[in-house]
Image (tube, rainbow, N blue to C red):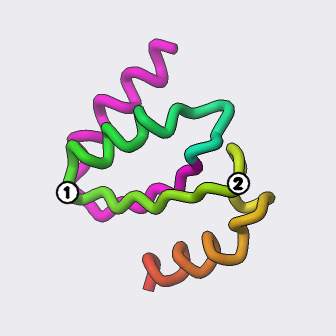
Amino acid sequence: QKLAETGFERAKKLDMPVLILASENDQVASFDKIREVADANSSIKLIKYTKSNHIILYDYDRDDAIEKILGFLE
């Protein structure tokens, strides 16, 4: 828990482009907490998914997630 809290606080201060893919249905990571971090830092782009769970690349939104990641990296 302490590690997660530290990570969230440090992510708010990143000064480089960051892409976060997250699902509202995630049973492991709190989507509300992830949105809080993204809202606190304009360098973070958050893409919300509604069908997948924790590992989006192995779930329903896989193809769209890969497309968004490749677009971000270009």
Above/below status of 61 relative to 23: below
**In the structure shown, which secondary structural element does the residue marked by tag 2 occupy?**
loop
Residue 46 locus on image (x, y percent)? 40, 58
Q: Please report the bounds of the magenta region as a residue range.
A: 1-23
Q: Amino acid at mark 2?
A: Ser
User: Does residue 14 show up magenta in the picture?
Assistant: yes
* Residue with the mark numbered 2: 52
Q: Which corner quadrant of the image does residue 15 belong to?
A: bottom left
Q: Nearer the viewer, mark 2 or mark 1?
A: 2
Q: Is residue 20 left or right of residue 12?
A: right
Residue at 41% from the left image edge and 33% from the top image edge: 33
Position of the C terminus, as image quadrant, is bottom left
Look at mark 1 in the image and give the residue it sits on. Answer: 42
The residue carrying pointer 2 sits among few (fewer than 14), some (14 to 19) or many (20 or more) residues within 10 Å by Cα, namely some
- The residue sitting at the top extreme is 2
Q: Is residue 23 left or right of residue 17?
A: right
Q: Earlier in the sequence, mark 2 or mark 1?
A: 1
Callout 2 touching callout 1 (CB < 8 Å): no
> What amino acid is found at the position of numbered circle 1 in the picture?
Ser
Q: Is residue 18 left or right of residue 14?
A: right
What kind of element bears circle 1? loop
Residue at x-position 54% and y-position 73%: 69
Residue 25, quarter of the rendered image: top right
